[in-house]
Image (spheres, grey):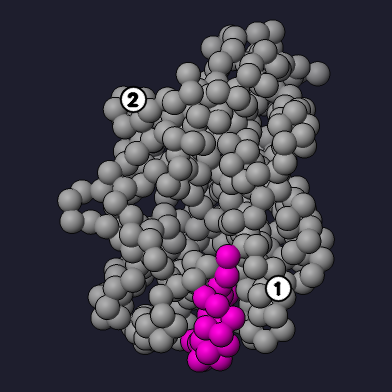
Amino acid sequence: MSGPGLATQPRKGSQVRSITAYAVDGPYPPGYAPQFSTIRFDMVRSVVVRVDTEDGVTGWGECVGARSNLTMATLINSTLAKLVVGRDASDVVGIWAHLYRSYLHSSGADAAGVIAMSGIDMALWDIRAKLAGWPLYKLLGGASKALPSYAGGLCMSHKPPPELADEARGLAAQGYRAIKLRGGDRPEHDLARFIAVREALGEAFTLMADINTGYSLADLHWAAPRMEPLNLLWLEEPFPPYEREAYRQAARFVRQPLAIGENHFLRYDFQDLLSEGIFSYAQPDVSKCGGVTEIMRIAAMASARKIPLCPHSATTGLNHATSIHVLCAVDNPGWFESDAAPVNPLHHELCSEPYALDAQGCVTPLEAPGIGVTINEDYLAAHSRTPGL
């Protein structure tokens, strides 16, 4: 059966012709260098993945580069691309399984491999939705809806409390009804900042706190009870992801809900976390956890335990738009993390706008076929390298 709006069999020529990964650097203007926990950023980095088919359809994806975007791009260009070229681009799940068996299964599920797979998978879903003529959320079985959004990304950095309170007031004036605070400094400094923002915005305003893996168990024992009066929606990532015993203990004494997931990979990581009842909000990143294919599986696993999906957002509009599509296609959508950073060239210059914040502080998915964003290829060429080719 075919007809307007109905997906048909893949067109002849939809085989993958080429894959190119770009290590992209978006330098900040002089004097701007936000700091979170122990990290000070001088630019934003990512990896943009381009997949072309034999009949000229192009898909775009993003995988997180952090401080190693050259490494990620090299892995894709030199190794993973060869496992995908020549295969049917619309067989996204089949390609995911092939990469898993051919690379991760035989060589170990390393973080770099999963992150690299994520960008390829996203680009393939972009192609598949374009071939169908549908926005991605519709291809995934979803419907357009308004999603609550909080101000996240590289904003609310470690500043003196009065400056942070002013920044929070500015975000509220932009229409945000929820803001994520940034911790991971000395707990007493975090507490002073959090109190300043709560006092500035009032008790009705929704606040979350991301500790950025910066605490020890002793830190959290000190901080958690003192943060309880702030009525935080969640405490996010107090510890590094592999300190499982610390998370188990925290789940027993922390009264605020815990949120984790941005630094966990594949559904197998989440299976263990879910079975132990450690967290209340699932935060996989579609550009890190294994792509669209895998985040849909993780969402279903979380849904079985009545845990909402609140994806962590990465650097570019590709990730942001895709996260919104995914949230519209699951039955346990939570919050969308907007990029509220005052400066992010990989959001505003690399691609078209991935979303708009409405008067209620919500976002909706793009309606163009595929992910829906347009890449500024001139900017990409001027600010990227293609290692491993």
Identify which amino acid the numbered label 1 is placed on: Glu
Span highlighted in magenta in the image: 215-240
Q: Is residue 77 above or below residue 307?
A: above
Check if residue 180 falls in the magenta segment: no
Which residue is denoted by mark 1 in the rendering? 245
The image shows residue 327 at horizontal and vertical percentages of 63, 51
Labels 1 and 2: the sequence-earlier one: 1
Q: Quadrant of residue 359?
A: bottom left
Q: Nearer the viewer, residue 169 or 75?
A: 75
At 59% from the left and 81% from the top, the residue drawn is: 217
At 52% from the left and 75% from the top, the residue drawn is: 215
Residue closest to the far left: 30
- Image-based side of 41 in relation to 386, left or right: left
Q: CA distance from mark 1 to mark 2?
A: 45 Å
- Image-based side of 214 in relation to 137, left or right: left
The answer to whether the residues at label 1 and label 2 have Cβ atoms under 8 Å apart is: no
Q: Nearer the viewer, residue 229 or 160?
A: 160
- Image-based side of 70 in relation to 371, left or right: left
Q: Is residue 365 above or below residue 156?
A: above
Q: Residues within 10 Å of mark 1 (few under 14, many from 20)?
A: few
> Which numbered disc, 1 or 2, marks the residue closer to the eye?
1
- Image-based side of 298 in relation to 325, left or right: right
Check if residue 220 falls in the magenta segment: yes
Q: Is residue 329 visible?
A: no
Q: Is residue 76 above or below residue 112?
A: above
Assign a secondary structure to mark 1: helix
The image shows residue 269 at horizontal and vertical percentages of 73, 55
Which residue is denoted by mark 2 in the rendering? 381
Identify which amino acid the numbered label 2 is placed on: Ala
The image shows residue 233 at horizontal and vertical percentages of 56, 76
Q: Nearer the viewer, residue 39 or 380?
A: 39
Q: Residues within 10 Å of mark 2 (few under 14, many from 20)?
A: few
